[in-house]
């Protein structure tokens, strides 16, 4: 593993832990040259997963794209980076362990909304406003009322 600080190719693993319920390994490393420490995460790849868009196009599932959308919805809210990472980890785990090679983008959006609803209601509304493409105030208010019912 190459050091992200000085670029030296040799690092040593100080600690290794498996994350609960996920196929993820956290490793604490130290550069053998500059002695700075950093953390890496390893995850098992189960093969390609494709997202089927509304217009029928297919694109490779992008964890970063999902993560980016959720981060935007959580800006200036009391939601930690770790909570967001965990949400995306569980989402990806659920998608990959269904044994599917293709999943509709709508399914991913609904799964994100379900998780955001439990995490933070404002983040849920923000994500829903983009995901569901609210075109007027009535559709926005209807979504808020639906959220209040639960």
Image (cartoon, rainbow, N blue to C red):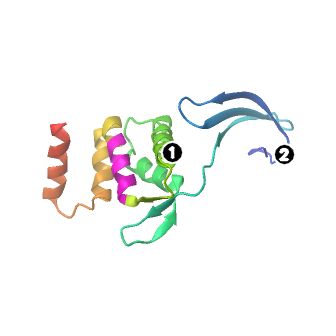
How much space separates mark 1 and mark 2, taking CA atoms?
Answer: 36 Å
Q: Quadrant of residue 19?
A: top right
Which residue is rendered at x = 38% and y = 42% of the image? 76
Helix, strand or loop under label 2? loop
Residue that mark 2 sits on: 8
The quadrant in which the C terminus is found is: top left
Is 110 part of what is drawn in magenta?
A: yes
* Camera-side mark, 1 or 2: 1
Q: Residues within 10 Å of mark 1 (few under 14, many from 20)?
A: few
* Residue 98, image x, y percentages: 47, 47
* Residue 130, image x, y percentages: 31, 58
What segment is highlighted magenta in the picture?
Answer: 106-115
Which residue is rendered at x = 55% and y = 35% of the image? 22
Is 47 part of what is drawn in magenta?
A: no
Q: Residues within 10 Å of mark 2 (few under 14, many from 20)?
A: some
Q: Quadrant of residue 25?
A: top right
Towards the viewer: 50 or 72: 50
Residue that mark 1 sits on: 97
Q: Is residue 107 above or below residue 82?
A: below
- Asked whether the beta carbons under mark 1 and mark 2 sit within 8 Å of each other, the answer is no
Q: Is residue 102 above or below residue 58?
A: above
Which residue is rendered at x = 50% and y = 66% of the image? 59
Q: Earlier in the sequence, mark 1 or mark 2?
A: 2
Which residue is rendered at x = 53% and y = 31% of the image? 21
Q: Main secondary structure of the magenta part?
A: helix
Helix, strand or loop under label 1? loop
Viewed as shown, does residue 142 lie left or right of 14? Answer: left
Viewed as shown, does residue 57 lie left or right of 129? Answer: right
The quadrant in which the N terminus is found is: top right
Viewed as shown, does residue 23 lie left or right of 69? Answer: right
């Amino acid at each position: 593993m190459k050091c992200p600080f000085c670029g030296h190719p040799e690092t040593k693993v100080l600690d290794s832990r498996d994350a609960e319920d996920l196929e993820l390994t956290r490793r604490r490393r130290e550069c053998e040259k500059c002695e700075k420490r950093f953390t890496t995460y390893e995850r098992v790849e189960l093969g390609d997963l494709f997202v089927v868009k509304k217009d029928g196009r297919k694109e490779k599932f992008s964890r970063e794209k999902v993560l980016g959308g959720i981060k935007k919805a959580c800006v200036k809210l009391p939601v930690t980076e770790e909570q967001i990472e965990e949400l995306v980890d569980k989402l990806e785990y659920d998608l990959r362990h269904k044994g599917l090679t293709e999943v509709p983008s709508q399914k991913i959006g609904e799964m994100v909304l379900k998780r955001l609803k439990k995490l933070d209601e404002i983040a849920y509304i923000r994500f829903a406003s983009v995901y569901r493409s609210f075109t007027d105030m009535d559709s926005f208010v209807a979504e808020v009322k639906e959220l209040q019912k639960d």
